[in-house]
Image: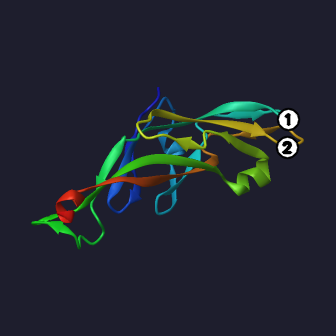
Amino acid sequence: MPRKKTGTLDIDPRFTIPYRTIDVTDPNLVIPVRVDDGLYRLKAAVRYPFSVDRRLYVRTGIALRIPSTVDVAPYKPDRTIGDSPVFTRMSVHGVVTNIFETIRTKNLYVLGPQVIPSMYDGEIVLLVMNIGKTSVTLDPGEEIAELHFDMAPISVLGLDQILK
């Protein structure tokens, strides 16, 4: 029977993104591993046999709910409107990249997605290809890709008040 686990991915000290595990026997196998601030390793949820040149969709067992925008306070609120700090409205999206070690040792290359858009709500599923000359197997819990989040400013809340 699948068990579920929930948690948050720390994007920076001011913001987190919630995640939940989906349909996995051991949720601890798929919990993203934090490598650095805002950088996580994604893992395979189940076993995948890759023959030469084969492409497969690899389930990570991790579902995200990325908001469309977030309001982020500055690290040091040096600009205020009255007693309130100025907030920046940010758009958030995830970026998936290959792990060099996985390419080198298993010859598995993540073709997509490269970007997980804001407002995405669902499991991260990766299209992976065996680029080697021999068949390989990706086992549950093996790290397959890195995930980090980018935030781009959309507007500064309160800026119109400051400029007056």
Task: Please provide percent x and percent y for residue 121.
Answer: 42, 33
Task: Please provide percent x and percent y for residue 23.
Answer: 49, 29
Helix, strand or loop at mark 1: loop
Q: Residue at x 72, y 51 (%)?
A: 102
Task: Please provide percent x and percent y for residue 64.
Answer: 43, 39
- Is 2 rendered above or below residue 144? above
In this view, the residue in front, 2 or 108, is 108
Q: What's under tag 1, amino acid-wise?
A: Val
Q: Which mark is residue 52?
A: 1
Q: Residue at x 64, y 46 (%)?
A: 142
Q: Tell me: 82 left or right of 66.
A: left
Q: Tell me: 145 left or right of 49.
A: left
Helix, strand or loop at mark 2: loop
**How many marks can you see?**
2
Q: Quick check: marks 2 and 1 in contact, CB under 8 Å?
A: yes
Q: Which residue appears farthest toward the left when viewing the image?
A: 82
Q: Which quadrant of the figure contains the C terminus?
A: bottom left
The residue that disc 2 covers is 132
Q: Tell me: 102 left or right of 150.
A: right
Q: Residue at x 29, y 65 (%)?
A: 74
- Is 62 rendered above or below residue 73? above
